[in-house]
């Protein structure tokens, strides 16, 4: 049962359990035997006075598992988690089924419409007559149409269709509306990829049926696909587990006033406040007095699960599980200024480098290595040139408003692009955060809010025409796009390197990060780089290496990952002239983009053999970045790729010690079945552990690996662990500390599927619990 509970989510380190006895006397004996156990706290007894049959207790998960195994055979006691209750509105018969589409035959009032609830047939036209409106139906879809050019996808013996022929045919069709044409606008764009025969892309509106017919008639020579919307890869808040997606029609209403205060008790305006109960959450934004009132139906102060406060800028976020709130008076929330954190002391008046830049050793780079002569494009939400760190940015285009306001790229209402720009090229001006390549030429392509695949293709066309060297793409879509892939290949052939965020869904790498023609970046974090009461703690995962690095919980993973980058609690610029600490693969990717600019500007290879623009230059750049990486030993290369790139090694100032040493370690006899990066990992973690403790855990890990190579018996390994007093078990030290639930790994006796987290524990006889992803 404990394992089943963990599959639903990891709870606190000490969890509530129900202990039932077959006989009251057995429960009394059990209670007496554990009365002096510091790990077990009895909260309540259920049953007749003097003869309770059930106890409610808190204890660590491993203690509960041990007790369950002890009494499993005799069935004298049953131990199971005390689970919270929840409502699940989705019944099995409706799961996975889409709603029926509204068509002409099932419109209300049409001949094929169903009867009214009282059994009388609906009268045609009655809703229109009563309300004077029209029925909601599916609108025409927006599609991309282009000639198929990717090798291996064209039908054998068939030549591609000419773009002019496609455009002429579509414009002549009365039920197809051509809304835009994307393609080269000058000779530089036409010859930029070295091919010259460039397919344009038509953006057209038509019905899905018409698009299907067009695709069929082209016999494989046309790409006809939906113009997908794109999203930015920042991290959205996640509600606590066991929250139902329903809203009660009646019941109590909890209304509470929240006041958000900052430095010197000054009110914090425009802070987003989220309150989570057992049903739908509510949110609001603070006014100029720092106040916001939130009302929840069907909730009481005892059913509130979490409180999350996200300031607009200049403060750390605040996150509290099981908050103690009251409807009777104002609930005060104090936020920490960013400058309260030791590594950001006197910030922003005193310029700083982020922890991620220091982790990549940018702070040790000679001062003349500044990315001179390299062009970087940031395809995002714009960049606010009102910011002191971004005033040097002079080039850009507003792709989404190119027909009405192409120069609106400096208006960043989302703030995402400004944050990325600060990491890449923040000015070296004794203020704020210095970027990787402050002397690079930055081009901003505004794509958000509302960006789509067609506009990303257009932005890449801009990059080809402007001969951009590196493109930062902290964005993604729901599915691969062949039309976009053809444009990415064009960009690569033109010598443009696309650095792409892997995504923040916590699942497989999202497109275009999954493209084989880009460098995909996942996100890692490091302990002691953010306050313990901030929302950044929700990104911490159980497996932590000796330097405190962990794989970010939200980050996507897969074999497509090239390298990882710092992506938790990253401080950078936001409009108008402020700073914010954000999470996301969106924040990890600019670290690698900035590094790529330094490599192209200063590595000897790109001043000689790979100076000429072309796909070979891009591939060599990716190789250099990967080879410079220091492995992040978290046991799974699909989550960190080659590791965290090192600036000094990447620009050629020091010998690469990342990938090569990993390969050497593997050849020298890494544990069987483990990839090079895995050979040094240790699955132990401690929340905000100090350096001495982390070193001790690393030593235990090395002992564990030696034991694995020697292949001792389970009993001898258990005895060795008992002698040290510590072992390795799948459990989450952050469950109680961060109030989080999620999926982990583990399985008795070896690597296998299971649930839990990693923490030291007292080993019982029977061997070490295995771990794996």
Image: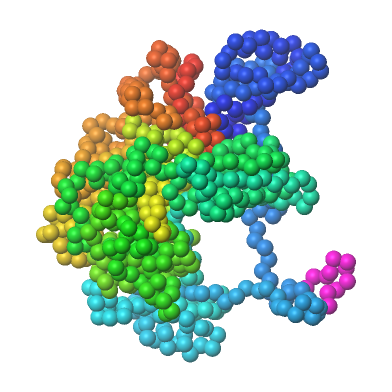
Residue situated in front as seen by the camera: 531 or 313:
313
Split into 4 quadrants, where in the image is the C terminus? top left
Q: Position of residue 302 (x, y in %)?
A: 69, 36
Residue 445 visible in this rendered orientation of the protein? yes
Q: Can you tell which quarter of the image residue 27 is in?
A: top right
Q: Is residue 500 visible?
A: no
Q: Is residue 41 above or below residue 607?
A: above
In the figure, 430 relative to 84: above or below?
below
The residue depicted at 61 percent of the width and 21 percent of the height is 68
| Residue 117 highlighted magenta (yes or no) | yes
Q: Nearer the viewer, residue 628 or 686?
A: 686
At 16% from the left edge and 43% from the top edge, which residue is drawn?
654
Q: Verify whether residue 263 appears in magenta.
A: no
Residue 477 is left or right of residue 439, and the answer is: right
Seen at 67% across and 63% down, the residue is 99
Q: Is residue 614 left or right of residue 577?
A: left
Is 359 placed above or below 401 here? above
- The magenta stretch is 112-123
How is this picture coloured? rainbow
Q: Quadrant of residue 157?
A: bottom left
Look at the magenta stretch and give its main secondary structure. loop
Residue 68 located left or right of residue 111: left
User: For the view shown, which residue lies furthest in the bottom direction?
Assistant: 172
The x, y position of residue 517, in whole percent, is: 32, 60
Q: Position of residue 707 (x, y in %)?
A: 34, 21
In percent of width and height, residue 664 lies at 22, 36
Quarter of the image with the N terminus is: top right
């Amino acid at each position: 049962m404990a394992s089943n509970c963990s599959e639903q989510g990891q709870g606190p380190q000490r969890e509530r359990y129900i202990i039932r006895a077959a006989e009251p006397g057995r429960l009394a004996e059990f209670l007496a035997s554990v009365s002096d156990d510091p790990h077990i706290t009895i909260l309540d007894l259920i049953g007749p006075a003097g003869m309770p049959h059930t106890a409610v207790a808190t204890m660590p998960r491993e203690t509960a598992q041990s007790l369950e195994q002890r009494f499993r055979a005799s069935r004298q006691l049953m131990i199971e988690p005390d689970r919270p209750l929840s409502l699940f509105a989705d019944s099995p018969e409706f799961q996975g089924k889409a709603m029926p589409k509204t068509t002409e035959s099932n419109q209300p009032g049409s001949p094929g419409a169903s009867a009214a609830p009282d059994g009388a047939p609906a009268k045609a036209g009655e809703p229109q007559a009563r309300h004077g409106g029209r029925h909601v139906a599916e609108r025409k879809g927006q599609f991309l149409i282009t000639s198929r050019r990717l090798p291996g996808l064209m039908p054998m013996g068939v030549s591609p269709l000419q773009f002019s022929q496609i455009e002429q045919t579509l414009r002549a069709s009365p039920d197809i509306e051509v809304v835009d044409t994307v393609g080269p606008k000058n000779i530089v764009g036409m010859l930029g990829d070295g091919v010259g025969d460039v397919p344009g892309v038509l953006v057209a509106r038509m019905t899905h049926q018409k698009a299907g017919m067009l695709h069929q008639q082209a016999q494989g020579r046309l790409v006809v696909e939906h113009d997908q919307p794109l999203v930015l890869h920042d991290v959205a808040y996640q509600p606590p587990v066991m929250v139902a997606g329903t809203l009660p029609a009646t019941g109590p209403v909890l209304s509470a006033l929240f006041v958000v205060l900052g430095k010197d008790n000054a009110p914090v305006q425009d802070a987003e406040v989220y309150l989570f109960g057992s049903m739908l959450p509510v949110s609001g934004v603070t006014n100029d007095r720092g106040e916001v009132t939130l009302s929840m139906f069907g909730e009481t102060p005892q059913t509130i699960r979490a409180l999350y406060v996200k300031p607009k800028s200049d403060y750390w976020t605040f996150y509290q599980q099981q908050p103690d709130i009251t409807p009777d008076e104002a609930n005060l929330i104090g936020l920490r200024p960013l400058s309260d954190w030791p590594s950001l002391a006197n910030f922003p008046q005193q310029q700083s480098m982020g922890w991620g830049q220091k982790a990549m050793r940018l702070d040790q780079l000679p001062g003349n290595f500044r990315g001179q002569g390299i062009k970087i494009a940031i395809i995002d939400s714009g960049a606010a040139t009102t910011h002191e760190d971004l005033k040097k940015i002079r080039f850009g285009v507003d792709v989404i408003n190119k027909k009405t306001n192409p120069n609106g790229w400096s208006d960043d209402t989302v703030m995402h692009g400004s944050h990325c720009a600060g990491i890449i090229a923040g000015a070296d001006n004794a203020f704020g955060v210095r970027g990787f390549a402050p002397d690079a030429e930055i081009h901003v392509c505004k794509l958000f809010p509302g960006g789509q695949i067609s506009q990303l293709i257009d932005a890449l066309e801009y990059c080809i025409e402007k001969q951009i060297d590196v493109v930062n793409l902290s964005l993604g879509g729901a599915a691969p796009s062949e039309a976009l892939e053809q444009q990415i290949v064009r960009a690569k052939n033109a010598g443009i390197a696309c650095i792409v965020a892997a995504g923040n869904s916590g699942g497989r790498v999202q497109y275009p990060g999954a493209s084989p023609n880009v460098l995909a970046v996942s996100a890692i974090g490091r302990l002691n780089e953010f306050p313990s009461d901030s929302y950044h703690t929700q990104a911490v995962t159980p497996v932590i290496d000796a330097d405190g690095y962990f794989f970010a919980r939200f980050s996507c993973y897969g074999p497509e990952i090239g390298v990882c980058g710092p992506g938790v609690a990253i401080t950078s610029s936001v409009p108008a002239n402020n700073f914010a600490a954000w999470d996301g693969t969106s924040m990890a990717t600019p670290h690698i983009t900035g590094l790529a600019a330094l490599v192209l500007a200063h590595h000897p290879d790109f001043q000689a053999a790979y100076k000429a623009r072309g796909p070979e230059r891009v591939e060599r750049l990716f190789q250099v970045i990967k080879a410079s990486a220091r492995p992040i030993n978290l046991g799974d290369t699909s989550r960190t790729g080659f590791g965290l790139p090192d600036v000094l090694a990447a620009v050629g100032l020091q010998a690469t010690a990342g990938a090569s040493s990993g390969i050497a370690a593997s050849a020298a006899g890494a544990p069987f079945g483990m990839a090079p990066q895995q050979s040094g990992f240790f699955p132990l973690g401690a929340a905000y552990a100090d350096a001495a403790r982390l070193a001790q855990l690393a030593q235990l890990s090395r002992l564990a690996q030696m034991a694995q190579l020697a292949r001792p018996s389970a009993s001898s390994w258990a005895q060795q662990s008992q002698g040290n007093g510590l072992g390795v078990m799948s459990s989450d030290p952050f469950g109680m500390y961060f109030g989080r639930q999620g999926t982990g790994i583990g399985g008795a006796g070896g690597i296998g599927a299971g649930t839990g987290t990693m923490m030291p524990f007292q080993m019982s006889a029977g061997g070490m619990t295995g771990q794996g992803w």
